[in-house]
Image (spheres, grey):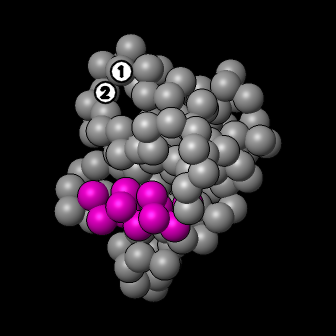
Amino acid sequence: MKFFIASDHAGFELKESLVRFLEEMEHEVANLGPNDDSRVDYPDFANLLCGKVLANPKSFGILVCGSGIGMSIAANRHKGIRAALCNEPYGAMMARAHNDANVLCLGARVIGLGMAECILQSFIKGEFEGGRHTQRVEKLH
């Protein structure tokens, strides 16, 4: 799978760990920044990532900030992006299965690395069920 990943300063450390985690699982990863934990504005990185996900339809995005809330709000402003803020694995699985989520948002100050890895694994394993959910997802556009 192809992943674009970005964060703000609060999510920098978790983002870097998740890049390594994805690479170890042999996924294609494009780290969109930032390159250090200097203060940045989360909408800039959410907008950059969403543009990349929309330009690469079979790709997915991962956004990390302090709570995950700012990134999810910024990402969901983009038509065609279905960003899900997940704090546990079941939500990540359901975001893929029922909502066809294409961006996973995580809060670095809310979850630890171990939980983030479990959430990401559930997101990766999840597949959109289609069926009755297709009509609902289409209404989002």
Amino acid identity at mark 2: His
Amino acid identity at mark 1: Glu
CA gap, disc 2 to disc 1? 5 Å
Image position of 33 with respect to 137: above or below: above
Q: Residue at x 65, y 64 (%)?
A: 70
On the image, numbered disc 2 is attached to which residue?
27
Image position of 110 with respect to 57: above or below: above
**Crowdedness of circle 1 by 10 Å Cα count: few (<14), some, many (20+)?**
few
Dot 2 falls on a residue whose secondary structure is loop
Dot 1 falls on a residue whose secondary structure is helix
Tell me the tag on residue 108.
none
On the rendered structure, is 95 left or right of 131?
right
Task: State if disc 1 and disc 2 touch (CB < 8 Å).
Answer: yes
* Residue 2 visible in the snapshot: yes
Residue segment shown in magenta: 42-52
The x, y position of residue 124, in whole percent, is 45, 36
